[in-house]
Amino acid sequence: MSDPTTAALLDRDGVRLTVHPDGAVATVTLCNAGKRNAQSPALWRALAEAGRLLPGSVRVALLRAEGVSFSAGLDRQAFTPEGFAGEPSFVDMARGTEAELDAVIAGYQEAFTWWRRTDLITVAVVQGHAIGAGFQLALSCDLRVCADDVQFAMRETSLGLVPDLTGTRPLVALVGYARALEICATGRFVHADEAVRTGLANLAVPAAELDAAVQDLTAALLAPARDAVVELKGLLSGAADRDLDDQRAAERAAQGRRLRDLAGLGD
């Protein structure tokens, strides 16, 4: 639900960015409820632009969606021969060189990448269907708070494709390789109870309680010192890629920076 006291910094192509009056919280809203927030290259460019426009004061970025569904995935117009007006169709993309195809997909992925910045905590607020690109967008965020009617699904393989919008790494990290493989290969729905049980979602509540749950979580995330949370996110997000000695060294370095800052000796 948007706050009427906020002004939109961006409102185009199915994406709206607003910053709360205190400057610490931003909301990115998918606002094409009539098409169940189906995604397109134009929407991805708008999402990437939202990341670039985000003020430096923002500590928590919420990703929300209007209507009954978070996102039904890629707009089916993408699978028609003509595709989207002014955009390369799938057929055109396939006819390009490997470098050209790689560059197009890399551009699409930018919409899904900035949510992992260490200076932010990002929260996907998910209701109804989150399918394919919608599932991957929710996975782009640090945390997921869901309504109890949520249905996640990775349906790309049913179309002869694979998930390519940065969702595979967080999915494996959250639920493990075997379950991630099964979810993606079968394309089945993951409901709220399984999402919470497997770590895919942090919390699932009745839809009527979703706004209150998000408000409570946001307040809790804003309570600690910002610099401590930034250091913490860097430690945790990189832990899987470090061995024990490297992680120990990263902890020492992070704590050293915090101690010097608290003692007034920081840069």
Image: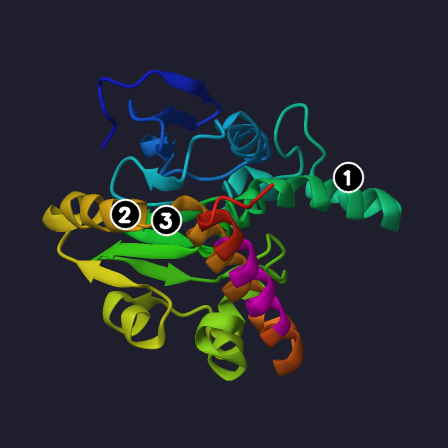
Mark yes or no: residue 141 visible: no
Near mark 1 (Cα within 10 A), the count class, few <14, some 14-19 or many ≥20, is: few
Near-viewer residue (101 or 235): 235
Q: Which residue is disc 1 drawn over?
A: 92
Rendered view: 243 above or below 94: below
Q: Which residue is disc 3 drawn over?
A: 123
Rendered view: 7 above or below 254: above
* Among numbered discs 2 and 1, the one appearing first in the sequence: 1
The percent position of residue 115, horizontal first and vertical second, equals: 51, 46
What separation in Å lies between label 2 and label 1 (alpha carbons)? Answer: 49 Å
Say which residue appears at 43% left-offset and 55% top-offset: 142
Say which residue appears at 63% left-offset and 62% top-offset: 160
What separation in Å lies between label 1 and label 3 (alpha carbons)? Answer: 35 Å
Say which residue appears at 86% left-offset and 50% top-offset: 98
Q: Which residue is disc 2 drawn over?
A: 223
Say which residue appears at 30% left-offset and 26% top-offset: 22
Identity of the amino acid at label 1?
Answer: Asp
Query: Toward which corner of the image does residue 251 lie, by quadrant?
Result: bottom right
Q: Which residues are magenta?
A: 249-258
The percent position of residue 90, horizontal first and vertical second, equals: 70, 43
Task: Judge whether residue 252 is colored magenta.
Answer: yes
Identity of the amino acid at label 2?
Answer: Ala
Q: Main secondary structure of the magenta part?
A: helix
Q: What is the secondary structure assignment of the residue under circle 1?
A: helix
In the orientation shown, which residue stands out farthest toward the left? 208
* Among numbered discs 3 and 2, the one appearing first in the sequence: 3
